[in-house]
Image (spheres, rainbow, N blue to C red):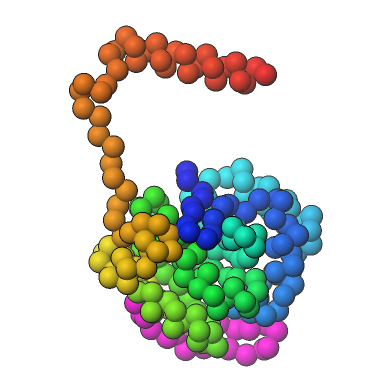
């Protein structure tokens, strides 16, 4: 399964135990966690490391969750993005994104990260729909989601309880279907500049004609050599 993507200035890669320090710092930052995932359960370094090690051993589809570190090519780790609550039956997943520092939140980094996630979601993972919840007080994020092409599907009254503030808040819910993604003029316009290609277009399928195919005997020999090489590597 492909667990990375790259744009003009950002790289997405799956989070690993090596990211513990950056993740703990982010989780302890109230300004960040209030926008990304309020009521986040507090964990210590060892608990988080074990969770990341465990996550690396299980297929994301089985966990129904995959988390990415957002890496800026000059500034290093600047945020987290995730696809969660995955449903194989409904072919959908919830999208979350959070940037650690305010300077990156207002510099368009979230837009590029979202494009990279949508590219994976629709072109690689073949999801039918991606949706996102936004807290009522995060108007900046809500405007960006709609501006990018997500459909504002509604506002859920008093749908979420903030433990620290001891109050209920509303949640916006936004959705992007495969059809909406493929026909988005906005994404068609900005993805070549931010990602390097029009991500609304499916990846071309490689077709091998008869002249390009290996003869049966050569094909078997090739496979046998690959098996031998794999066995040698396992023995080392």
Asked whether the viewer can see residue 231, the reply is yes
Number of numbered labels in the structure image: 0
Asked whether the viewer can see residue 91, the reply is no
Q: Nearer the viewer, residue 50 or 101?
A: 101
Q: Nearer the viewer, residue 64 or 232?
A: 232
Coordinates of residue 212 in the picture (x, y in percent)? 25, 23
Which residue is at a point 74% across and 64% down the rendered structure image? 24
Coordinates of residue 37 in the picture (x, y in percent)? 60, 73
Q: Quadrant of residue 128?
A: bottom left
- 211 relative to 12, above or below: above
On-image quarter of the C terminus: top right
SS majority, magenta: strand
- 155 relative to 96, above or below: below
Which residue is at a point 39% across and 50% down the rendered structure image? 124
Stretch in magenta? 151-168
Which residue is at a point 59% across and 61% down the rendered structure image? 72
Tell whether 109 sits left or right of 220: right
Coordinates of residue 87 in the picture (x, y in percent)? 42, 58
Which residue is at a point 42% across and 17% down the rendered structure image? 223
Q: Quadrant of residue 179?
A: bottom left
């Amino acid at each position: 399964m492909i667990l990375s993507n790259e744009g003009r200035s950002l790289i997405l890669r799956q989070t690993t135990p090596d990211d513990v320090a950056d993740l703990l710092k982010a989780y302890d930052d109230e300004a960040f966690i209030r926008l990304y995932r309020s009521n986040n359960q507090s964990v210590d370094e060892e608990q988080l490391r074990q969770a990341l090690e465990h996550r690396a051993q299980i297929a994301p589809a089985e966990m129904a969750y995959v988390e990415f570190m957002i890496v800026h090519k000059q500034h290093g780790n600047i945020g987290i993005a995730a696809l969660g609550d995955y449903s194989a039956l409904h072919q959908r997943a919830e999208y979350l994104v959070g940037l650690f520092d305010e300077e990156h939140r207002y510099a368009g980094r979230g837009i590029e990260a979202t494009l990279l996630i949508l590219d994976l979601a629709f072109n690689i993972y073949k999801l039918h729909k991606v949706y996102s919840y936004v807290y009522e007080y995060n108007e900046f994020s809500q405007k960006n989601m709609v501006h990018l092409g997500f459909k504002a599907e509604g506002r859920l009254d008093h749908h979420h309880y903030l433990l620290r503030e001891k109050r209920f808040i509303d949640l916006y819910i936004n959705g992007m279907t495969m059809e909406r993604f493929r026909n988005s003029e906005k994404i068609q316009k900005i993805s070549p500049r931010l990602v390097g290609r029009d991500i609304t277009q499916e990846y071309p399928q490689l077709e091998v004609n008869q002249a390009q195919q290996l003869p049966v005997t050569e094909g078997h020999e090739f496979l046998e050599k690959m098996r031998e090489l794999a066995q040698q590597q396992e023995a080392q």
